Structure formats: structure tokens, C-alpha cells
Image (cartoon, grey):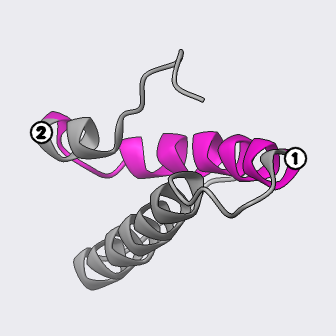
Amino acid sequence: MLGFLFNERECKELDYVLKKELDEMLFDLNDKRIDPDIKVAIESRYKIIFRMYARLASPKEISKYARNRMYH
């Protein structure tokens, strides 16, 4: 496990970057043109990025990006 110390500005920037990445992955997961195998890889990456975001964001913000586990 690694640890990082961020100042307030860096936390805001990390929050922004993670939200944008989550938004992009949600868009791709909802795109019917993308191959199902690629979507599996995106879903795996989404889980990692979401866990990172959950460490920074409020529960209200987290709920905006939470996905149903049964969703495919």
C-alpha cells in the first residue's frame, strides 16, 4: 500500500480528474457500439477508479457514480 499527502488544491484536482474519468467510462459502458469484451475491461477499471474516488468524495457525490452490481 502506498500513501500520499495532498494539499487542498491537489485534492480538488484529483477529485476532478477521477470524476471525468468515471464520466467517460460510464459513457463508454452505455455505448452499444463497444464490444462486450472491451466493456468487461472498462468495468474492471471503473471499479478501481470508483474506489479511489470514494476515498475523496462525500456520500452524496459517491452515489452519483455508484452502479448496480447486476447492471451489464
Q: Nearer the viewer, residue 35 or 59?
A: 35
Q: Which residue carries the number 1 mark?
A: 37
Q: Amino acid at mark 1?
A: Asp
Upstream in sequence: badge 1 or badge 2? 1
In this rendering, the count of numbered labels is 2
Q: Amino acid at mark 2?
A: Lys
Q: Which residue occupies 47% across, 56% down?
A: 26
Q: Is residue 8 above or below residue 56?
A: below
Q: Quadrant of the N terminus?
A: top right
Examine the rendering and report whether any part of residue 1 can be seen.
no
**Considering the numbered disc 1 on the image, is that residue within a helix, a strand or a loop?**
helix
Q: Left or right? Give the position of 10 relative to 25.
A: left
* Span shown in magenta: 37-59
Q: Which mark is residue 8?
A: none
Q: Which mark is residue 60?
A: 2
Q: Left or right? Give the position of 51 relative to 53.
A: right
